[in-house]
Image: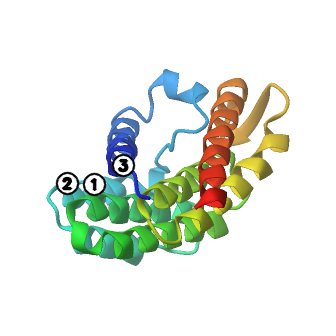
Amino acid sequence: MAKPKTLWVVAGAIAVLALVIIALKHHYDTMEMPWSLVTPPQVVEIVTKMVELRNEGRFDESIQLGLRSVSGHSGDDFIYQMVAVTYFVRALHDKDQSGKWTKLGAEYAQKALDANPNDLANLFNAGMNFTVAGDDLDTGGCEYYRKAQTVFQSLAPRLQGERAETQGRTVRLGPFRKQNEEQLSRVAESLRHCATS
């Protein structure tokens, strides 16, 4: 069963996180938060405009701007993640077609994962987006929980040690490791529910 309150909280947090990260991209504190998306310099203008359009409820325009900006270079994964978030926010606003928008959001989370399968922050955020999709869908949600679990499990061995590079910067792994463990636990609980329904 969908958990609308959880979806609202997660989608709202994702939207706020994206805005805060754009505004504070050069702030020192973000250098120690590996799960946060730091806008690549080459897409700052595009992403800022995407967020403005999304906040105005102009979802199609936001998505099309993002997709026209995909270039086959670094930063594409970030744009795909922003497109996914836009679809999730749209699902919150359009309850009649919520499932359709959620599935499209999950498709773009997969595109982000495929575009940059080695970046720790991109992997983590794809896992989070699959979790959001699982939370929203009455039918098919378990499939997305399984995808999220696979992503979080694949991250675990890569989070050993003290530091690693993600998004072109060196970060401490402790906070990321803790978040990954929490998400793995949460998804495992959701999958237990899937097994009984």
Which one is in front, 82 or 76? 82
Observer able to see residue 123:
no
Measuring 59% from the left and 68% from the top, which residue is drawn there?
Answer: 110
Query: What number is the disc on residue 11?
Result: 3
Q: Position of residue 118 (x, y in %)?
A: 74, 56
**Disc 2 secondary structure class:** helix
Query: What number is the disc on residue 55?
Result: 2
Q: Write down the quadrant of residue 102 in the picture.
A: bottom left
Query: What number is the disc on residue 125?
Result: none
Query: Where the C terminus falls, by quadrant?
Result: bottom right
Q: Position of residue 63 (x, y in %)?
A: 33, 71
Q: CA distance from mark 1 to mark 3?
A: 13 Å
Amino acid at the residue labelled 2:
Asn
For label 3, count other residues whose C-alpha is less than 10 Å away and answer few (under 14), some (14-19) or many (20+).
many
Q: CA distance from mark 1 to mark 2?
A: 6 Å
**Cβ–Cβ under 8 Å for marks 1 and 2:** yes
Looking at the image, the residue that sits furthest to the front is 196
131 to the left or right of 82: right
Which one is in front, 107 or 187? 187
Observer able to see residue 104:
yes
Measuring 51% from the left and 56% from the top, which residue is drawn there?
Answer: 129
For label 1, count other residues whose C-alpha is less than 10 Å away and answer few (under 14), some (14-19) or many (20+).
many
- How many marks do you count on the picture? 3
**Disc 1 secondary structure class:** helix
Instruction: Give the labeled residue for mark 1.
Output: 51
